[in-house]
Amino acid sequence: MVKRIGVLTGGGDCPGLNAVLRAVVKTAMMKYQYKVIGYRDGYRGLVMNDFMEFKAGDVSGILDKGGTILGTSNRDNPFNFRVENNGKVEYVDMSDKVVENVKAHGIDCLVLIGGDGTLTSARDFARKGLNVVGIPKTIDNDLSATDTTFGFMTAVDTATDAIDKLHSTAESHHRVMILEVMGRYAGWIALASGIAGGADVILIPEIAYDIGKVSEKILERAASGKHFSIVVAAEGAKSTDGEIVISKVVNDSPDPIRLGGIGNRIAEGIEKLTGIETRVTVLGHLQRGGHPNPYDRILSTRYGVRAVELASEGKFGLMVSLQGDSITSVSLEDAVGKLKTVPAEGELVQIAKSVGVSFGD
Ligand code: F6P
């Protein structure tokens, strides 16, 4: 019998996190009369026993708010946790301590909200015997076991709005405008916003680009009287020589590589090969902030409600998932460790090519 649920948000923040928390807390408290504990700052709260008990009003007025009222972290892995002893940094497996804490607090189920890193630890806690339900979050939409992660559609809205605005300067000044978007090793945000915003060139990690071909496309447009072009580049886009552009390495992060800088790299190449003035906008964390759009508010609510229902049914070791129009669940064992990338020959790439988009291939 479940009586007490623990919840945390892990990894990068993402539009819809508060909407999920609201759905989890409201469903648990109102439908099932469970108590809900919220751990602060992702797995750090679970390891350090830093938590709050939700009261009825705590999730009021947060459906439309960006960020997460619990805080989050994309640095803390409970199975390899950074601790500092007398100035010496060590990485320690704190998972047994977490299991002890969870049992000591009488938590019957943990609802863990995050991307692949958070959900991999969720799977590992399930293997250690904890009752766990996962909820898939990331603007990157790169989790293989769900059709859509919450946060992605809002990020696409933000990127599409940016492309719409960049058209003004591109057209007025006869320039090439490059928009660099996030997505890590998957091109979903670039592809979706590029199609929605009418980009002329879309560069994604799944299709290696040749800067010569990108420039040819821009010159062809100029020759046909279109003296501007819009390029959307995913931060993980790769050139045919296999090069990706890294902005920094965050050493104490479970996934230390931070991508960034591809926009400037491409701009140099385009200016050199076309002679057309080229400018870069890096959209960055604007894609993670602000109000979730209605799609994400609804998806987050569906995920949150279903996660608590699974707990009430005694079904654990699962991740809630969107398959077609239905919310279902998949084993955490099958849900993690596999990136969902853009199929290079898939329908979205084909329709983009049909309307004249170049992928630089
Ligand atoms: O996974 C979400 C994401 O925003 C990626 O698209 C991006 O590469 C990364 O996180 C950025 O991480 P940080 O917030 O640490 O810069």
Image (cartoon, rainbow, N blue to C red):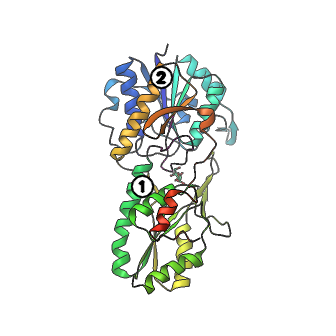
Residue that numbered label 2 is attached to: 5
Residue type marked 1: Val
Magenta segment boundaries in residue numbering: 135-150
Identify the element where label 1 is drawn. helix
Q: Secondary structure at mark 2?
A: strand
Work out whether residue 258 or residue 295 is closer to the camera in this orientation and state it: 295
Label 2 is placed on what type of residue? Ile
Q: Is residue 255 above or below residue 97?
A: below
- For image coordinates 31% across by 27% down, the residue present is 57
Whichever of callouts 1 and 2 sits on the residue coming sooner in the sequence is 2
Instruction: Name the main secondary structure of what is drawn in magenta.
Output: loop
> Is residue 182 in sight in this rendering?
no
Q: Is the Cβ of the residue at disc 1 closer than 8 Å to that at disc 2? A: no
In the rendered structure, the answer to whether residue 321 lies left or right of residue 292 reads right
Where is residue 164 shown, x and y percent of the image?
A: 35, 66
Q: Which residue is mark 1?
A: 156
> Percent x, y for residue 3?
46, 15
Q: Position of residue 244 (x, y in %)?
A: 63, 64
Q: Residues within 10 Å of mark 1 (few under 14, many from 20)?
A: many
